[in-house]
Image: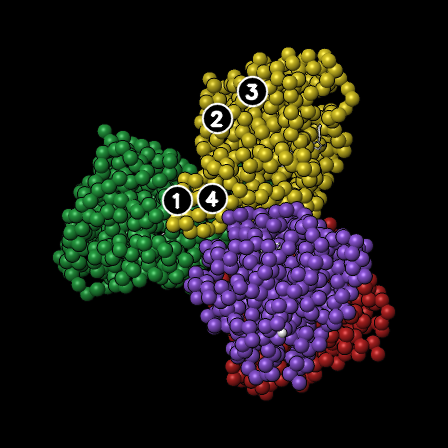
Chain colours: A yellow, B green, C purple, D red
Amino acid sequence: MASPSTSSDSPSNTPAPAPGTLGVWFVGARGSLATTATIGLSALAARLTDETGCVTGHPDLDPRGLAPWADIVVGGHDVDTVPLVKQAERLVAGGVVPAILAHQVAGELEATEARLRPGVRGGEAADQRAIVEQLADDIRAFAAGVDRVVVIDVSSTEAPHDAGADAVTWADLQAAWAAGRAPLAPSSTYACAALLAGAPYVAFTPSPGIDVPALLELAAERGLPYAGGDGKTGETLVKSALAPMFSTRSLAVRSWTSINLLGGGDGSTLSDPAARASKTGTKRSGLESMLGHEVPGPMHIDYVEDLGDWKTAWDHVRFDGFLGTRMTMQFTWEGCDSTLAAPLVLDLARLTGRAAAAGETGPLAALGFFFKSPMGSEEHRLAQQWDALLAWSRECADRVSS
Amino acid sequence: MASPSTSSDSPSNTPAPAPGTLGVWFVGARGSLATTATIGLSALAARLTDETGCVTGHPDLDPRGLAPWADIVVGGHDVDTVPLVKQAERLVAGGVVPAILAHQVAGELEATEARLRPGVRGGEAADQRAIVEQLADDIRAFAAGVDRVVVIDVSSTEAPHDAGADAVTWADLQAAWAAGRAPLAPSSTYACAALLAGAPYVAFTPSPGIDVPALLELAAERGLPYAGGDGKTGETLVKSALAPMFSTRSLAVRSWTSINLLGGGDGSTLSDPAARASKTGTKRSGLESMLGHEVPGPMHIDYVEDLGDWKTAWDHVRFDGFLGTRMTMQFTWEGCDSTLAAPLVLDLARLTGRAAAAGETGPLAALGFFFKSPMGSEEHRLAQQWDALLAWSRECADRVSS
Amino acid sequence: MASPSTSSDSPSNTPAPAPGTLGVWFVGARGSLATTATIGLSALAARLTDETGCVTGHPDLDPRGLAPWADIVVGGHDVDTVPLVKQAERLVAGGVVPAILAHQVAGELEATEARLRPGVRGGEAADQRAIVEQLADDIRAFAAGVDRVVVIDVSSTEAPHDAGADAVTWADLQAAWAAGRAPLAPSSTYACAALLAGAPYVAFTPSPGIDVPALLELAAERGLPYAGGDGKTGETLVKSALAPMFSTRSLAVRSWTSINLLGGGDGSTLSDPAARASKTGTKRSGLESMLGHEVPGPMHIDYVEDLGDWKTAWDHVRFDGFLGTRMTMQFTWEGCDSTLAAPLVLDLARLTGRAAAAGETGPLAALGFFFKSPMGSEEHRLAQQWDALLAWSRECADRVSS
Amino acid sequence: MASPSTSSDSPSNTPAPAPGTLGVWFVGARGSLATTATIGLSALAARLTDETGCVTGHPDLDPRGLAPWADIVVGGHDVDTVPLVKQAERLVAGGVVPAILAHQVAGELEATEARLRPGVRGGEAADQRAIVEQLADDIRAFAAGVDRVVVIDVSSTEAPHDAGADAVTWADLQAAWAAGRAPLAPSSTYACAALLAGAPYVAFTPSPGIDVPALLELAAERGLPYAGGDGKTGETLVKSALAPMFSTRSLAVRSWTSINLLGGGDGSTLSDPAARASKTGTKRSGLESMLGHEVPGPMHIDYVEDLGDWKTAWDHVRFDGFLGTRMTMQFTWEGCDSTLAAPLVLDLARLTGRAAAAGETGPLAALGFFFKSPMGSEEHRLAQQWDALLAWSRECADRVSS
Ligand SMILES: NC(=O)c1ccc[n+]([C@@H]2O[C@H](COP(=O)([O-])OP(=O)(O)OC[C@H]3O[C@@H](n4cnc5c(N)ncnc54)[C@H](O)[C@@H]3O)[C@@H](O)[C@H]2O)c1
Ligand SMILES: NC(=O)c1ccc[n+]([C@@H]2O[C@H](COP(=O)([O-])OP(=O)(O)OC[C@H]3O[C@@H](n4cnc5c(N)ncnc54)[C@H](O)[C@@H]3O)[C@@H](O)[C@H]2O)c1
Ligand SMILES: NC(=O)c1ccc[n+]([C@@H]2O[C@H](COP(=O)([O-])OP(=O)(O)OC[C@H]3O[C@@H](n4cnc5c(N)ncnc54)[C@H](O)[C@@H]3O)[C@@H](O)[C@H]2O)c1
Ligand SMILES: NC(=O)c1ccc[n+]([C@@H]2O[C@H](COP(=O)([O-])OP(=O)(O)OC[C@H]3O[C@@H](n4cnc5c(N)ncnc54)[C@H](O)[C@@H]3O)[C@@H](O)[C@H]2O)c1
Ligand code: NA
Ligand code: NA
């Protein structure tokens, strides 16, 4: 991991114009995912771990113009104040991060600690415009020490939120603020701050974030790229690989049941039905689009404290074959959510940073590979998303390398 | 199902030059798969069932020039003599085919019965050239009543067989025959007969079949297309959808265990270790090619009589993620082998028939979607095979329609 | 199945004093379970099927004094009016009952049809005492044709219901009725009617039924035996076999997740959260009692229409071993609810009938083997329940045989 | 863990006559299981861990007269020479033992190291009587420092071995040795040495061990108790809890498939088909005895290196219910073999030590709860074994306490 303004070579990306230092600004920087990503980045930079789980380390993906691991620096917002080193201890106790690794990168964690700033919660009795400006100033200060910043939302999932008539256009939002109203959900204040600070924005959560007409207008006006939403790391990932199999073989899926058990901070947040509604929304949409029809079947996300960051998902698929034959498939997925998501978040920072350098603006549809509910795209099939990612990656690499 | 020399409209394929009557010649015509396909074809022709499970019924696949269901007629070889109607009763008892359907198509089964001819076993003390000629004559006689014949091997899986120096070239084979030797495995005598009768050949089994240098030379010389090998209908199908997920996400698969339980005729054949060797060979190759490295883990095919045609497969995948985190995925597949395979066999007949009409020759690599060990292709990833099938299908449709 | 007043020998119960004809009166006589039991009884009587699934057919269970299958006759109440023969057709279509069998026993079903009477629903604007008397008269009329009647509730699960101060004593209930109030849930009106008609009562559902102080007083006063509640046929059955394994091995269960998917009438009823509350209550109690501590973990019962009478349950158990090692076990159960429950309902009729003959009164704790929430017993461990059942069975047999 | 000749109090067993110091002599003392047991014993003695997984810590089991954890001392034989501390490191790396714990008990491991002696392999060109005497001398020397010794075989599983006519009686064996023959398998030389040294013997493996007529005669003559064989810790344990459920419910099991994946030393040993034969033998016997009939279905034990000490078992049960309905149950067990077995081995030492004090001789049938193939008993049902263990435990406690 870079100290700001420092540059070095990364293992996998040999000869290409130096992309400069990349700053990743995490909203939710003290959470399990952000902490794992921060630890992992330091480990990659120091070659203490390999690129397993990193899509940008895949041999088929064009690496030209991606920031080397050692040239990436982390900062961020969080409403929590427990130090990163403590968060790392929690992850070690939960079996997410090896003890030895947390020890080896402790110095880097403390350096990152110094770059974290207090976040904002909803319902705070304050001037929302001022809050947004404060957040934007934090990001600008961080940006001063790096060549490019990407803001990534990895904070707790919020409930669905409709900003309504107050946020249809950027002018509406200004007027609402002037009138003392606070139409944005917290996640959207961060998205707004990112844009005002000139930073591309990535939503790894299903929270409202940038997906508000006034903010999309702002992004377009500033010529900034963005991507989202809701990282695809577990059961939905498997679905996006499997559902096309049923569809292309003309097998008729009659029900698809999805059970998700997880503990940890994310599990605890999602034990609130309102927050869960955001999540089950993004999880469901893809399946029906891939299969081309409504698919009944329960979908549960249950908090099982004892599981910690380890998610167990069980899916049960009932399908009919030729002559009406009834068949079933079921799978159990036992994954560690934070180590599945952490490398993707780093990948998204590198890819979005390079996309901005290549002049990309608006929704980055080709990043759909990473998301449950991809902005700018209706494609949910994993393999087709992969092919699209590779093609787009080559284009971006060409542009930044020439 | 057509009576030979008759033509009619099929539901899904309306306006296109009439492709004429298509004859499907099954090697193993009394087996579970062939009998299910024969019943199913009659049911499709009479609109007693829908196209669930039929790839050629998929809305994205170009149907122009495919033989309508009602214009397809079945014949074939088998060494068994139990009547088709009895085979159908067995399938009804095993829950593969609905009793009512078997009843409704009984007349068609008897018509097919009249078009079946005795097959040949290995080790028969006879002149192999004469045997091949007899088989070819049977096919020619059948061909006289239809516009085009496709020969499909759905007979019992044979052990791996090396025809050796006697079958390197067509001339070698002639010489070996002249010298009274019989170098070909039974499945290869059928493949040879198909070619001599001018019929495209499809291997739905992993038996040697056409995959003998002398026969590939003959196919090239006659300008005939062929495809194979070993239908991909269960656990291997799932693997070809899932393995790319691990690979594109840079997850490191450490072991992949595959357990297959099945009864029925196929299960019984595969309880012979020699026959099983053919099968586990085709099953294993794809996985390692998709993952790019050797993958340890047992692979079993076990005969469990009580399961009949119902195959239960359990797969257990151990993979590592970022920071060395150990994770697992497992799935259980409970499918009816014959109803999974039967529509594919009909699809292959239609697609291969149209390919021949479109002037295709040699291995039909774009049919890799259907096979565990695709001839003419190294691509095992299901989604990429699907895209390739759709593109090629459009080309063939264009050619036969113009 | 007997015509009333007819007697015959049963296969498994050779020489013992003839117990006479046994009448089984089903509350919910047109439901899936009652219909399957009725068909199955006829099939057993006619030796069209064997005793698989029948506990009273187990070689270790003392059969002396049990009513032979051929000496049992069915009657009952239901609010539905669709004929039994139609219900049987539905079960055939759903794969619960073989078509041939339904056909063979059609005559018996029509005979039973003539013995069914209209039931009562809750909320009916009527005199509850009069309703109970009408129900009791129906049972008495049925009883006239047999030697003994057992009433078994297999109707739709009701929501939990507190009859309150109006049903603390039999006198309270009389007073409440006199005052025009209707404190009993429908299931309790049937239980009351059974007692008034002098019949033992068995609750195969978790509905309130007999479990009301005033009714327990009535039962005691009349010297009638009763048993319940809620048949243990699927996931809870497995739990009662497995949980003691963890406990006796001192393994520490940290969470136990239970997912139940089912369609059919029962699934549809249980998609109502109020009814489901009765069910999850009975399902949960046993586990914690067997493990000796609270066990977190979600428990879902989900309606998946497409599954019909086939229940799929998935359970996931997280437990710790020595030195804090984290381990898991999971199971998937795919059972047909009605054919699992039907023989048990017949067993309960036989065992309860014999118990009454042997002079048993009050809660039949030794029948706990059959129930999720056994009346009169805190023992939930299946094996211990089995041993208790065998011992008690021997006692009853001794008494009725001497 | 005690230093020899030292005594102290154990947490769970307060007032009872001090049973004195107990020595556990492990055959295979450097293996995963023995090392885990040695570490765990020290941790129990020092109250660094709790009694999870220890059957003798169960509140229902009578603890009077059991050696307190702190009064147990370990010694043993092994053919391997890698120090215990190194073995512990391997177990830490494999996630079996927490790093902190291994660190805390390192001193105790070194003390145990000093009590280990070289073992013997088969096929050694030496005088077998002399070998046995040397082994017995090692055990006698260890016994000198404690009040009682129990020898437990936890060494690598050997292939089935028939000692033949040379070992029918103790006299035969003497004669064979005198004639320079070596009829005993290595495991049997240890069993013989234990008996000669006056120590009770427990076989936690399926190796031949004491199960040789000549040795059983010797045990009887010396009045020594013994127990075995083959610890029941995973899939077989689950079977012994589940199979009685099918049987008591009169459900007809048609096939039972058992797949065991494991790495580690045991997995590696069992990848040898001869050793595996011992294991599948003990695993299979119980099932058929519990179900009362032959049960087809494959049983595999596969070495999957990557799994280390973690065993994954998948079982698939096909059973029929009433009216011939086909149903299935499957389970997946993911357990850590060594931490499942280690506390049982300690339990067996305590229980066998107390049994000897109580004057028990011959096969300890009541210890069948612990074994796949219980010596002296045909009972395989876990719950019934549990009840028998509790009753016998109470008797022994009474005898040693009075
Ligand atoms: N881990 C995965 O695989 C995965 C996949 C998809 C999506 N996600 C999403 O990523 C997010 C993070 O997951 P996690 O496991 O790290 O959760 P977590 O609960 O451990 O961390 C969330 C962090 O966000 C902080 N936070 C909450 N509200 C905030 C606010 N208003 N401003 C700033 N910070 C705030 C919290 O203090 C906490 O530190 C969740 O929304 C989750 O749904 C995770
Ligand atoms: N899903 C599937 O069903 C599936 C998938 C892939 C491959 N396959 C392969 O398809 C083949 C057929 O499967 P099935 O389930 O119908 O098996 P089956 O045993 O029911 O039928 C095989 C038939 O081949 C006949 N036969 C055997 N030797 C012959 C010979 N020398 N000449 C002519 N006929 C011969 C047999 O008499 C039998 O009628 C098998 O090789 C199987 O491995 C099936
Ligand atoms: N394995 C099992 O099937 C199983 C196990 C345990 C408990 N049970 C319980 O058994 C009951 C029956 O199950 P099912 O699958 O047959 O359900 P079902 O829905 O098919 O049948 C219920 C029947 O009860 C009738 N009914 C409803 N209200 C009534 C009333 N007030 N008076 C008289 N009849 C009434 C309905 O009309 C219907 O015919 C349910 O309560 C279920 O929870 C079943
Ligand atoms: N859950 C369980 O762990 C479990 C359950 C039942 C049975 N067992 C049995 O317990 C035994 C030990 O299992 P493990 O996992 O510790 O295996 P392991 O391979 O780790 O250890 C076996 C040890 O025995 C030693 N050994 C081999 N031959 C010997 C000989 N002739 N004399 C003395 N020592 C010898 C080896 O050097 C090694 O140290 C195996 O036989 C296994 O089948 C284990
Ligand atoms: Na900058
Ligand atoms: Na009567």
Give the residue number, with chain letter if any, for mark 2: A393
Residue C80 placed where, x, y %?
A: 57, 54
Q: Give the label, 2 or 4, closer to the camera.
A: 4
The circle drawn on residue A225 is: 3
Does mark 1 fall on the same chain as mark 3? no
Does mark 4 fall on the same chain as mark 1? no
Quick one: SS at disc 2? helix
Which class describes the residues within 10 Å of circle 4: few (<14), some (14-19), or many (20+)? many
Q: Quadrant of ligand 6?
A: bottom right
Disc 4 residue type (three-letter) = Val
Residue at mark 3: chain: A
Quick one: SS at disc 3? strand
Q: Is the residue D354 above or below the residue B259 in the image?
A: below
Which class describes the residues within 10 Å of circle 2: few (<14), some (14-19), or many (20+)? many
Q: CA distance from mark 3 to mark 4?
A: 37 Å
Question: Closer to the N terminus: mark 3 or mark 4?
Answer: 3
Q: CA distance from mark 1 to mark 4?
A: 10 Å
Drawn side of residue A357 relative to residue A85, left or right? left
Question: Closer to the N terminus: mark 3 or mark 2?
Answer: 3
Which class describes the residues within 10 Å of circle 3: few (<14), some (14-19), or many (20+)? many
Quick one: SS at disc 1? loop
Quick one: SS at disc 4? strand
Q: CA distance from mark 1 to mark 2?
A: 38 Å
Q: CA distance from mark 3 to mark 1?
A: 42 Å
Drawn side of residue C238 relative to residue B165, left or right? right
Where is the C terminus of chain D found, in terms of image quarters? bottom right
Disc 2 residue type (three-letter) = Ser
